[in-house]
Every structure is written in C-alpha cells, then in structure tokens.
Amino acid sequence: MTQQEIEENAFAKGIREIAARSSREASIARAEIQKALGVKKAAYYNRQNGFVKHTNIERDGLLRIFRRHKVTQPWGL
C-alpha cells in the first residue's frame, strides 16, 4: 500500500479533532466506529491508521459518524 493510499484510508485526523475537544467524545466515536465496522480494537487501529481500504459502504458509515461529531474532513493521518 502506498503512502497516498494510507492517507486516503486513514481517519486518525478525524479522531484527533474529536479528542482535542473531548476525550470522552473520542471514546464514544471510537466505539461507534468499531461497531459500524464490526471490528475489535486491534483491527480498528489498523483501519484508523489507513492500513485497510474501506468499502464505499464503510466510508459512508464513517462519514456519518464523523458528521455527527462535527468533523467534516476526517481523512488523513
């Protein structure tokens, strides 16, 4: 996977934006994302850091979660 592909699939930037406002809200967002993707903690972090490509349906779900948490540009490291 290239660095560009990793950047396009990573959502660490979005989680950091939420965590900057509230660590509790970031924990809630992480739990929502884990549930939406159907993954446990280790698999979640692989996805957060861009090591796994998301399907279009997964990307849409992630965007909905981030919008609920007032993040409009979640992609990136």
Image (tube, rainbow, N blue to C red):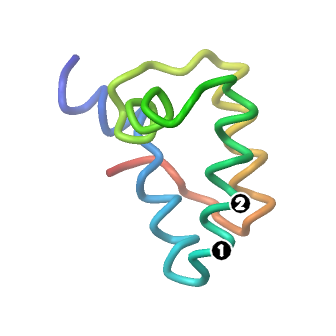
Residue pointed to by mark 1 = 24
> Which element type, helix, strand or loop, lies under badge 1?
helix
> What percent of the width, then of the height, locates residue 49?
35, 40
Q: Which mark is residue 61?
A: none
Q: Are marks 2 and 1 in contact (CB under 8 Å)?
A: yes
Question: Which residue occupies 73% across, 20% down?
Answer: 57
Q: Amino acid at mark 2?
A: Ile
> Which element type, helix, strand or loop, lies under badge 2?
helix
Q: Is residue 64 above or below residue 27?
A: above
Pointer 2: residues within 10 angstroms few (<14), some, or many (20+)? Answer: some
Quadrant where the N terminus sits is: top left
* Frontmost residue, 41 versus 16: 41
> What percent of the width, then of the height, locates residue 5?
31, 26
- Distance between the Cα atoms at labels 2 and 1? 6 Å
* Frontmost residue, 70 versus 37: 37
Q: Which mark is residue 28?
A: 2
Outermost residue on the bottom side: it is 21
> What percent of the width, then of the height, locates residue 64?
78, 46
